[in-house]
Image (cartoon, rainbow, N blue to C red):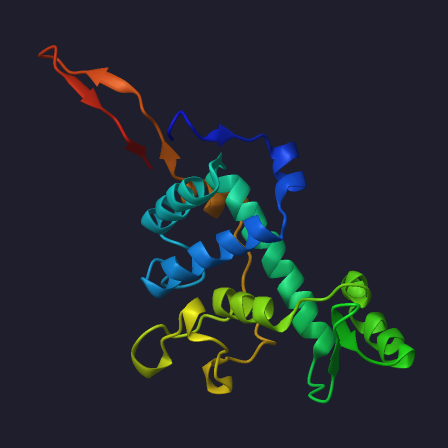
Amino acid sequence: MSTSAVEVSDEKVKEMWDKRLTEIFCDICIKEILKGNRPDTHFTKDGWLKIITNFEKETGKGFSQRQLKNRWDALKKEWKAWKKLKGEDTGLGWNPIKRTVDASDEWWESRLQVVPEAKKFKTSGIDLEFEGKLDQMFMGIVATGDKAWAPSSGTLRSDFFEDVNNEIPEESEEENMKNDVHISNDVQIDGNGQKRKKTLRC
């Protein structure tokens, strides 16, 4: 990582995730998905390296892969709860003042019994534009041909979506460690006295 970047501890990372940083992170992840660096449910090592590098370049913050992966997992959990909360209700409105679903107290009471983890959305939900980004990240949309989508394309067509009730498998701690990418600026000297810069260790 460059020496100009600010390396951030795990405790401070949780405090730092504001809307701007989250949107930058999402946009970078979407670009890597569209480039094919998340062929299944996990980013490739190259995908993670590009996410780490581009996030640092755009924000000046040196977050580790684990820190960024934790944010990915937290966003995925929120997205799942939001989708489960809304369910099949297509007639829901949007309350621009509360920035959440515009529904009766009875609807909220009923839905929160089914999805208690969505309680926080009663006072502040996920707006449609951001929901579109999360859909792009977590629904596994095909990113080629007429199905391609980029953040600059606007809203997503409804035929892009897969069934949101499909469970997306969580990575195990072992898979997280296997997929870790470490960046190092260590210089090694080979047997001939020549310096070699070691830049990537997987």
Q: Is residue 167 visible?
A: no
- The one of 140 and 27 positioned closer to us in this rendering: 27
Quadrant of the drawing holding the N terminus: top left
Quadrant of the drawing holding the C terminus: top left
Residue at image point 79% right, 61% down: 120
Residue at image point 40% right, 74% down: 149
As drawn, is 200 to the left or to the right of 22?
left
Q: Is residue 118 visible?
A: yes
Residue 145, position as x, y percentages in the image: 29, 79
User: Measured along the vertical axis of the image, is residue 74 above or below residue 2?
Assistant: below
Residue 24, position as x, y percentages in the image: 50, 53
User: Measured along the vertical axis of the image, is residue 169 above or below residue 101?
Assistant: above
Give the total of numbered labels: 0
List the single residue furthest toward the bottom.
Answer: 91
User: Measured along the vertical axis of the image, is residue 44 above or below residue 162?
Assistant: above
Residue 88, position as x, y percentages in the image: 69, 85
